[in-house]
């Protein structure tokens, strides 16, 4: 059984979606958790619902100043740090010709450089604790090409490369770095773009419901992604570093997807 009992974990983007589910499962498994986000009301509500072992901290992961302000609060609450989950991200769907340059920069600032800052600034805390685990939440779009999400995809490919290099650099300090690749993220992320999707065709090219144990792709993907995160944060995954871990029902096997219809 995977154990994170007593571990001290920071989860970014924890006010909703996958980040929230990871925080909930960590608390249920006996960890102490700092939840970070920019959605302060949602984040505080989640932390309060989790009890005394959870604490909310405001953090824009793309801002080094925010990291420098948040980390002392996190270290004080947790009395150290054993693990980091780089989950915070944003999405923009549109063709390369459609996406504004400032939007592209913002995607990279949060999705890639936010992960870079998290690794760089949390590594000393993990080193002081005698080692630890960094888990990045990537995407299947960082493992294969897809139309309509070129910059988002580029950011997630970048996270993969960053994680592999960080695993090599930080391994000497007993710090492991891995990346999970879910097939679906928070529905709120892609809701603004859903009117352009051809829902019927998307269902035909998505993994079959039987792979999702009941036909609820988002809920199961979120839960399974959180379980994978707990495994990678635990000592049971001590031999895993620099790895990619898809949670996608076979999506990246190339059997189902032929692009996002509608774009």
Image (cartoon, rainbow, N blue to C red):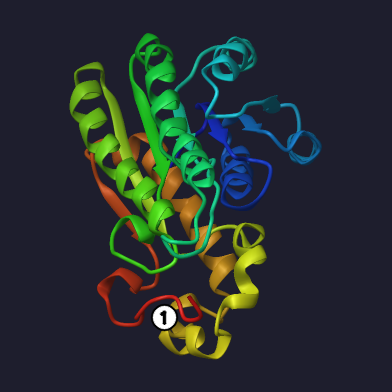
| Residue 59 x/y as whole percent | 63, 26
Where does the image place residue 30, in percent across and percent down from the top left?
58, 35
198 sits to left or right of 234: right
Residue at 73 percent of width and 38 percent of height = 39
- The one nearer the camera, 188 or 228, is 188
Q: Is 214 located above or below residue 100 in the figure?
A: below
Q: Quadrant of residue 211?
A: bottom left
Q: Which residue is mark 1?
A: 207
Height in image: 100 above or below 172?
A: below
Q: Residue at x 30, y 65 (%)?
A: 145
Q: Residues within 10 Å of mark 1 (few under 14, many from 20)?
A: many
Q: Which residue sits at x=43%, y=13%?
A: 125
Q: Is residue 164 left or right of residue 83?
A: left
Q: Residue at x 32, y 54 (%)?
A: 245
Pick the residue in front: 26 or 100: 100
Q: Is residue 222 above or below residue 15?
A: below
User: Residue 76 at what x, y percent from top left?
Assistant: 62, 10
| Displayed quadrant of residue 171 | top left
Q: Is residue 190 visible?
A: yes
| Residue 158 x %, y % | 31, 43
Eyeballing the image, is 55 above or below 70? below
Q: How many marks?
A: 1
Give the SS element for disc 1.
loop
Asked whether 83 or 236 is in front, the reply is 83
Q: Is any atom of residue 1 visible in this view?
A: no
């Amino acid at each position: 059984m995977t154990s994170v009992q007593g571990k001290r974990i920071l989860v970014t983007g924890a006010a909703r979606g996958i980040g929230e589910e990871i925080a909930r499962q960590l608390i249920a498994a006996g960890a102490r958790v700092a939840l970070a986000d920019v959605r302060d009301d949602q984040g505080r509500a989640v932390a309060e619902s989790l009890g005394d072992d959870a604490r909310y901290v405001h953090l824009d992961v793309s801002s080094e100043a925010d990291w420098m302000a948040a980390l002392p609060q996190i270290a004080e609450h947790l009395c150290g740090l054993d693990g980091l989950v780089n989950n915070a991200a944003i999405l923009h769907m549109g063709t390369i010709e459609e996406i504004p340059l400032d939007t592209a920069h913002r995607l990279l600032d949060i999705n890639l450089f936010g992960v870079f800052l998290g690794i760089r600034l949390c590594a000393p805390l993990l080193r002081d604790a005698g080692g630890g685990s960094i888990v990045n939440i990537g995407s299947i779009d960082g493992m294969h090409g897809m139309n309509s999400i070129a910059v988002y995809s580029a950011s997630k490919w970048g996270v993969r490369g960053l994680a592999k290099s960080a695993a090599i650099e930080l391994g000497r300090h007993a710090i492991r770095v891995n990346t999970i690749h879910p097939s679906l993220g928070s529905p709120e992320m892609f809701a603004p773009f859903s009117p352009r999707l051809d829902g019927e065709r998307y269902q035909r090219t998505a993994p079959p419901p039987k792979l999702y144990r009941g036909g609820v792709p988002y809920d199961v993907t979120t839960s399974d992604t959180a379980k994978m995160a707990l495994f990678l944060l635990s000592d049971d995954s001590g031999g895993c570093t620099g790895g990619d871990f898809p949670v996608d029902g076979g999506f990246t096997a190339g059997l189902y997807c032929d692009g996002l219809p509608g774009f």
